[in-house]
Image (cartoon, rainbow, N blue to C red):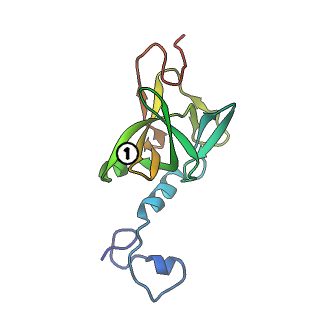
Amino acid sequence: MCGLWGYEGAPTKAALIGKTSDRRPVGFSVILFIYTVFGNSLEFRRRHNTYYSTLSAYASMDPVGIVTSSEIVISQWLGTADRELIRRLPNVSPVLLDIESWRTMILEPYNRLGPGVYIVGAKIEDEGVVAVMERRKPMLRVVQPDNDRLGRGRS
């Protein structure tokens, strides 16, 4: 039987919350991995009507847009996950996220995404969407039309 860190004798959910009688393995290794790899300071900004909404690296269940060919569909924010982890999950589909900028540290300026540049996300069935990360940076996809799906024109 494997525990939280993938070896025999690792802490169980009961041990982590203070109960020692229950020795079932923990099913939250994905959340622990996201927390230890990305830390507290990663932020994304998306435009919400007339102001910017900030999304952290963790699941906040805040609304976030998924960009399709004709519209923006609203889903729930589940945070970030590494590319290798997303590849191993079943029933996940790639999407483009309605995010305009991101930063890794709170004292750094935001990295704005230009026209036709989107952050790649992964839609997890009916649960929500996560941003796909590679080496502490979000994966980006470039789409080539004159005006992008968010209405930003090339100049």
Q: Residue at x 54, y 34 (%)?
A: 99
Q: Residues within 10 Å of mark 1 (few under 14, many from 20)?
A: some
In percent of width and height, residue 149 lies at: 48, 24
Horizontal side of residue 91 vs 100, given as left or right: left
Label 1's element? helix
Residue 120 image-quadrant placement? top left
Q: Residue at x 54, y 78 (%)?
A: 17
Horizontal side of residue 30 vs 50, given as left or right: left
In percent of width and height, residue 83 lies at: 37, 45
Please give the count of numbered marks on the rendered protein: 1
Give the quarter of the figure containing the N terminus.
bottom left
Please say if 6 is above or below 112.
Answer: below
Taking depth in this image into account, of 101 and 61 the one nearest to the observer is 61
Q: Residue at x 69, y 30 (%)?
A: 50
Q: Residue at x 46, y 49 (%)?
A: 128
* Residue 96 visible (yes or no): yes
Give the quarter of the figure containing the C terminus.
top right
Q: Residue furthest bottom?
A: 21
* Residue 42 visible (yes or no): no
Horizontal side of residue 141 vs 102, given as left or right: left
Please say if 67 is above or below 123.
Answer: above
In percent of width and height, residue 14 lies at: 48, 80
Q: Amino acid at mark 1?
A: Arg
In percent of width and height, residue 97 lies at: 48, 36
Taking depth in this image into account, of 118 and 68 the one nearest to the observer is 68
Which residue does the numbered mark 1 point to in the structure image?
83
